[in-house]
Amino acid sequence: MKKSKLSSLKLTFLMSLAIFFSIVGTGSYRDSSAGSDETYKSLKIFSDVIEEIEKNYVDEVSTKDLIQKAIQGMVHSLDPHSSFMPPEAFEELQQDTKGEFGGIGIVISMKKDLLTVISPIEGTPAFKAGIKAGDIIIKVDGEPTKDMMLWEAVKKMRGEKGSNVLITVVRKGESDPLEFKLERDVIPLESVRYVMVKPGYGYIWITNFRESTVDDIEKALKEFESGKDPLKGLIIDLRDNPGGLLNQAVEVADIFLEKGAIVKIKGRLGKHTNVFNAHPDRIKRNYPIVVLINGGSASASEIVAGALQDHKRALILGTTSFGKGSVQTVKPLRDGYGLKFTIARYYTPNERSIQAEGIEPDIFVKPGAIKEPDEKKDDRILKEKDLDNHLEALPFEDKTKDKKEKKIKKDKKEDSDDEIKDDENDGEKELRRIDYVTGKIKVESLISDVQVKRALDILVSYEIFKNLKG
């Protein structure tokens, strides 16, 4: 009875595949016929392998499991972003569209069959513990990830708030694996944060592209543009932004473009080929823009950066982006299964392929914190103020008062030095952009970020040069 049931299941599967291939075949009848013959021969071999394993394998096996694993292997062999998902995996994918979930706060992908961190989400347990983009996760709770599906790894790392998970990673430059014991937390999927860095210069940080991203950016711009100081320049931070919804990326780019293509999508089939174009804006935004990217900027964020770069609407600063330029679609299947597979590639307006190439910045700037100047070295240089009986800046200036002010400044400088030393002992504290208590961006941290500071200097310099005579 059992053997009969297995044979029936196998026969039904093979007949379904044969019918599928006969329906979707394209081209001339002769090509279809040749293709069908090859398909039939391959399916017969597949059937023979299953039958041989059922009869003679050392342990009893489930035909259903064999077929599922065969499909998973087939789809996974196409590219890292295609996958056959059992019901629990499909449910995990749908959960990603919700506002929050319990986990550790990292975006991961399969890179050369290795479970790789694309980016940690700032403010989450993974970020606070020091997990970095490029880390390769080799174990989750002691279980090797070598043969683990992406969805399985995601499921193992997610869980109830307050529960723990042990992550083991391999990092470039480290001789031994690193272990991180992380306490799961609720991971909010807030999309946009913003702040005025200095009067006239705005900063918008887009962490991912979700349903509310465009609305949040327009809210930020409205606040910037209606302030007492006119907006002279804007920094858009797309670093460690793993992407998200295509329509939101297109609409974000459209905010700053008046015409022309934003992104071109090209697939094998005509229905998977499309061009998204910009539209004239009701509000004219002519201020200069600097966009920040790095190796964690992927997919939708690369679309925005590429469009603004090709249209010469923004200067791109940072390091080369991730290079995820493929389009996936998700098809629900019977019994709760799902199929995610690649249907097209992204191209910038100037026909540059994003896939595996990434977006090259106009100005290459490595990340890091700004180092404080060496005051001791500066003290060795003799200056006019160090000479005995030097003239004061203004005639009849009170030298006694001047000495008191210098002492106060010196005391403040020493206090400031102590604070700097404390920060240096606190790892990456200087580079953290948000206050975890208030959830707001810390302007002082932004200014200490080399890439942000460079972007701000460029915008300020542009304003100065624009007003120069000659």
Image (cartoon, grey):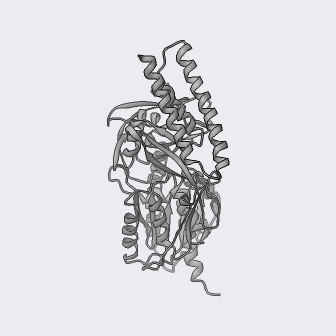
What residue sits 60% from the left and 29% below the top? 44
- Residue occupying image coordinates x 56% and y 13%: 56
| Residue 306 coordinates in the image, percent (x, y) | 58, 63
Q: Is residue 72 visible?
A: yes
Residue drawn at point x = 55 percent, y = 23 percent: 50
Give above or below for 258 relative to 276.
below
Can you say whether 108 is above or below 359 in the image?
above
Along the line of sight, the residue nearer the viewer: 175 or 7: 7
Residue 21 on image: x %, y %: 56, 43
Q: Quadrant of the N terminus?
A: top left
Q: In the rendering, at what x and y percent does residue 42 appear? A: 63, 33
Q: Position of residue 20 (x, y in %)?
A: 52, 42
Of residues 231 and 328, the one nearer the viewer is 328
Question: Which quarter of the rendering shows the C terminus?
Answer: bottom right
Q: Nearer the viewer, residue 234 or 86?
A: 86
Q: Is residue 377 left or right of residue 330?
A: right
* Res. 137 visible in picture: no
Image label count = 0
Residue at far bottom of view: 470
370 lies left or right of 199:
right
282 vs 374, nearest the viewer? 282
